[in-house]
Amino acid sequence: MLKCEHLIKKYLTTTAVSDLSIEIESGKIYALLGPNGSGKSTLMKMIAGLSKPNSGTITLNGKPLSYKSKADIAYMPTEAYFFGYMTCMDIGDYYHDFFADFDYDKYMYLLSEMDLEPKQKAREMSSGMMAKLKIAVTLSRNAKIVMLDEPLNGIDIIARDKIIHTIISNVSEDTAVIVSSHLVDELEKIVDYAIFIKKGGCVLSGDADELRETQGKSIVDMYKEIYA
């Protein structure tokens, strides 16, 4: 479905992504793993069309990425990007206006699941509430590619299971979910495919079960070995 080939992204003297190639197939949950600064967010922003690579190609269903691709890609950044005066309902209306695949009924259901009040304003929310709101609005799109950048940041331990269950329930045969995180122990139980990124490059990737078998260790232990 999605193919990234030999991507390079530089900022002045810093190389954020270095000759990175990955392939994403539908029906799977992918984990982009690595510490802060490893290149995960930069890669997601390039796939979302918010940043252009210096070299390399990104194709979706065999076609080069373009502004039209945004209709098929739902991206949740780490930043809180809503105006403070907006309520949850305002945000739902905003997304409904911009994205033809936005399911307002699903959004209201996810707000309830996340224990969020529809009339509450963004500026009144804690960091944990804002994190849940971003997840709810992103997963309410019926996109082919769903990217969640550090979705568990700011989420307390009790709420994480609900978030993870919500992510799993949004995977279909036609959808690929890409989750970036450094909370590897939380993702290990749900991911189908793991991609380890270090200094902007892919140092190890593969089917999660096959990696455990060939490496003889858990995804968490692989993470510790690669980044320690």
Image (cartoon, grey):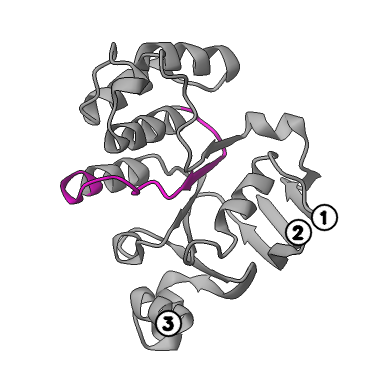
Q: Mark 1 points at which residue?
A: 54
Q: Mark 2 points at which residue?
A: 10
Q: 41 or 203: nearer the eye?
A: 41
Of the 4 image quadrants, the one containing the C terminus is: bottom left
The percent position of residue 209, horizontal first and vertical second, equals: 40, 74
| Residue plotted at (39% across, 35% down) | 135
Count residues near mark 2 (Cα–Cα under 10 Å), then give few for <14, some for 14-19, many for 20+. Answer: some
Locate residue 65: give its quadrant: top right
The percent position of residue 24, horizontal first and vertical second, equals: 60, 56
Q: Mark 3 points at which residue?
A: 228
Q: How far apart are marks 2 and 1 (CA)?
A: 7 Å
> Contact (CB < 8 A) between labels 3 and 2?
no
First in sequence: mark 3 vs mark 1: 1
Count residues near mark 1 (Cα–Cα under 10 Å), then give few for <14, some for 14-19, many for 20+. Answer: few
Badge nearest the viewer, 2 or 1: 2
| Residue plotted at (64% across, 60% down) | 23
Numbered disc 3: secondary structure: loop
Count residues near mark 3 (Cα–Cα under 10 Å), then give few for <14, some for 14-19, many for 20+. Answer: few
Q: In this view, does 167 lie above or below 72?
A: below
Q: In this view, does 161 lie above or below 76?
A: below
**Range of residues picked out in magenta:** 141-160
Numbered disc 1: secondary structure: loop
Does the stretch in magenta take in 29? Answer: no
Q: Which amino acid does label 3 sit on?
A: Ala
Q: Which amino acid does label 2 sit on?
A: Lys
> Contact (CB < 8 A) between labels 2 and 1?
yes
